[in-house]
Image: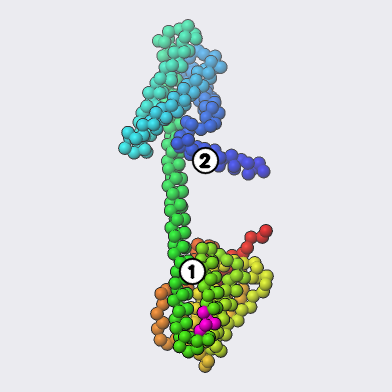
């Protein structure tokens, strides 16, 4: 628990450093940072004997108070300066270049803060300003170092914020692009399926009007499913297979005994998985399009679940004549799955069979 809390504190601190116009001087814990920075500067001076080298005779608490006041003034005036520069950013050609005049103004701040604190010290001691030039030199030296350190950190925070914003914008554009492509892929299903269905219906009308009528009824059920689910990313495997069964009925009207479609799915499997709508219908249609379907050479299609994949397998008996394709079938399926899962559609082909393995999306356990 302690480890998680510490990590959360670090993330929160980083987030806040990138907030408030990406400026460290506006951080909510700035007074704590001021105290720590003053303490570090004080110890650094004692360690290097800076006060003794310049012959400064101040009590330790007085010396620490002086350093603390310098840090407070440098920090707070820098915060005020940022607001002034930021409010006049429209006058600056690039927002990034606002850091340059900001730093130049901060050098004036260093001079003012050091002189103000030393002047206050001279009044407290009842001395003249000229008597404390050594103290002014020391205050200027550390004020400059403190200011340089703060502006270095501030620049890192500022550009890190810009980088984060650019990455977020890139991710947003990437998401929008992916959603647009996915929507386009979904919209391809309806005209593709409708075009092929009308081709089948055209043939049936001339052969058997009664069968054509029944075909139209079943076609309406199939197309109702597509219309109802076209806006969905996924549907339940059970709903998809009910749609496939209606589609298979249409195929059997057309091909009779020339085609055999076997589905071997348990009720548990049907209830446990989701899948993109019409993802099963497209490989079945693709198998019919590119293979011979006749009484002498019947086409057999098997559909079953294996290792969290829906397998659509057909015996391979390629047509000798070229069949024109719009390229929507398997390519459509592969692209649609890339937007839903990290697993890829697997396509296997050997001398006897063509197999498509569709990754199934497991339903969340309630």
Front-most of residues 45 and 154 = 154
Q: Quadrant of the N terminus?
A: top right
Q: Which mark is residue 159?
A: none
Question: What residue would you read off at disc 1?
Answer: 334
Question: What residue would you read off at disc 2?
Answer: 15
Q: Position of residue 295 (x, y in %)?
A: 53, 92
* Region rendered in magenta: 212-216
Marked residue nearer the N-terminal end (2 or 1) = 2
Provide the major secondary structure of the magenta segment. helix
- Residue 251 visible: no
For label 1, count other residues whose C-alpha is less than 10 Å away and answer few (under 14), some (14-19) or many (20+): some
> Who's the residue at 60% across and 67% down the image?
236
Q: Position of residue 325 (x, y in %)?
A: 41, 77
Front-most of residues 251 and 37 = 251
**Above or below: residue 40 compared with residue 224:** above
Front-most of residues 354 and 65 = 354
Q: Is residue 323 magenta?
A: no
Q: Helix, strand, or loop for circle 2?
A: helix
> Who's the residue at 44% across and 83% down the image?
202
């Amino acid at each position: 628990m302690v480890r998680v809390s510490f990590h959360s504190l670090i993330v929160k601190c980083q987030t806040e450093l990138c907030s408030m116009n990406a400026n460290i001087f506006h951080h909510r814990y700035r007074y704590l940072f001021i105290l720590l920075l003053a303490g570090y500067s004080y110890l650094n001076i004692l360690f290097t004997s800076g006060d003794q080298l310049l012959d400064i005779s101040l009590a330790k608490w007085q010396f620490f108070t002086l350093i603390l006041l310098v840090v407070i003034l440098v920090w707070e005036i820098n915060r005020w300066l940022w607001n002034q520069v930021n409010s006049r950013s429209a006058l600056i050609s690039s927002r990034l270049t606002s850091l340059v005049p900001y730093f130049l103004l901060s050098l004036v701040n260093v001079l003012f803060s050091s002189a103000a604190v030393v002047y206050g010290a001279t009044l407290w001691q009842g001395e003249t300003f000229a008597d404390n030039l050594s103290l002014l030199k020391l205050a200027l030296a550390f004020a400059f170092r403190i200011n340089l350190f703060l502006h270095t950190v501030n620049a890192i925070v500022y550009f890190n914020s810009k980088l984060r914003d650019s990455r977020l914008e890139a991710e947003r554009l990437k998401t929008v692009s992916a959603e647009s492509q996915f929507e386009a892929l979904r919209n391809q299903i309806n005209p593709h399926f409708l075009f092929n269905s009308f081709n089948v219906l055209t043939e049936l009308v001339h052969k058997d009007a009664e069968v054509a009528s029944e075909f139209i009824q079943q076609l309406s059920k199939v197309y109702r499913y597509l219309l109802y689910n076209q806006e969905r990313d996924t549907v339940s495997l059970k709903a998809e297979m009910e749609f496939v069964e209606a589609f298979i009925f249409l195929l059997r009207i057309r091909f009779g005994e020339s085609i055999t479609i076997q589905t071997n799915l348990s009720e548990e499997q049907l209830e446990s998985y989701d899948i993109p709508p019409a993802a099963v219908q497209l490989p079945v249609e693709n198998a019919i399009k590119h293979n011979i379907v006749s009484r002498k050479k019947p086409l057999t299609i098997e559909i079953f679940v294996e290792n969290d994949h829906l397998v659509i397998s057909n015996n391979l008996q390629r047509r000798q004549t070229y069949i024109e394709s719009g390229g929507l079938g398997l390519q459509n399926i592969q692209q649609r799955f890339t937007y839903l899962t990290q697993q890829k559609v697997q396509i296997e082909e050997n001398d006897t069979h063509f197999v498509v393995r569709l990754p199934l999306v497991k339903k969340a356990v309630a």
